[in-house]
Image: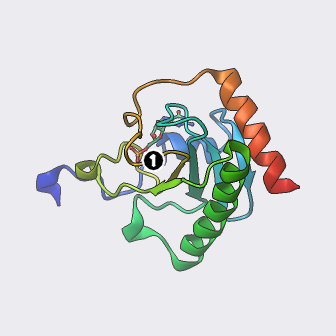
Amino acid sequence: MTELNQQTTYDDNNIFAKMLDGDIPYHKVYEDDKTLAFMDIMPQAEGHVLVIPKQKAVDLADLEPEYAAAVLMTSKKVMQAQRQVFEREGVIQMQLNGSQAGQTVFHYHVHLIPSSIHELGRHAVTQADNNDLADIAQKLAAVINA
Ligand code: 5GP
């Protein structure tokens, strides 16, 4: 493991932990007692959402069953809202485990991307317009909360 320079211990200062602590702003899509969903700031397609557990898990290996179930149920809500808002069936569900897989933030998260595997943009490269993210978050939240 160490040979691969993998991060295996949870860093309380990672960017998603700071969001959960309320120290960093984000565009919220949905929240409940076990999960938070928000807009990815460098989307791989319009409407790219991240779902995180309120548990200190680096990756899938650490995720407790109750949080795994909660993340999946929130992902389902978000995906259904994306289908409605973007009027498309195709939504990619992606999750990276370890830096070798390309993981860059070491708090477990599921990517939900309204796109096709053939059209997917580059990972965590281009920052989106803040107003656009706010607008999309509002539309998705409105569908989920309807
Ligand atoms: P990973 O590479 O760990 O699977 O994905 C991390 C994701 O977090 C990337 O898609 C990246 O665009 C996103 N991200 C990185 N920093 C921030 C941030 O400060 N705010 C938000 N909302 N997303 C971020």
Residue 119: give x, y in percent of width and height.
41, 39
In the image, residue 104 above or below residue 94 = above
Of the pair 133 and 57, the residue shown nearer to us: 133
- Left or right for 39, reference 126: right
Residue 110 appearing in the image: no
- Give the percent coordinates (x, y) of residue 136: 71, 35
18 versus 125 height, above or below: below
Q: Which residue is mark 1?
A: 116
Structure colour scheme: rainbow
- In the image, 116 versus 128, the foreground residue is 116
Disc 1 CB within 8 Å of nearest ligand 1 atom: no
Residue at the extreme right: 146
Relative image position of residue 70 (x, y in whole percent): 63, 70
Residue 65 appears in the figure: yes
Residue nearer the viewer, 107 or 87:
87
Residue type marked 1: Ser
Marker count (numbered): 1
Position of 10 compared to 101: left or right?
right
Q: Residue furthest left?
A: 3
Residue drawn at point x = 70 percent, y = 22 percent: 131
Locate the C terminus and report the quarter of the image it occupies: bottom right
Where residue 118 sits, quadrant-wise, is: top left
Q: Is residue 123 left or right of residue 146?
A: left
Give the residue drawn at x 50%, y 60%: 56
Q: Position of residue 32 (x, y in %)?
A: 74, 61
Q: Quadrant of the N terminus?
A: bottom left
Disc 1, SS: loop
Tell me what residue is drawn at x 79 percent, y 55 percent.
144
What's the residue at 56%, 63% (across, down)? Answer: 55
Say few, some or many: other residues with alpha carbon within 10 Å of mark 1 (under 14 / 14 to 19 / 20 or more).
Answer: few
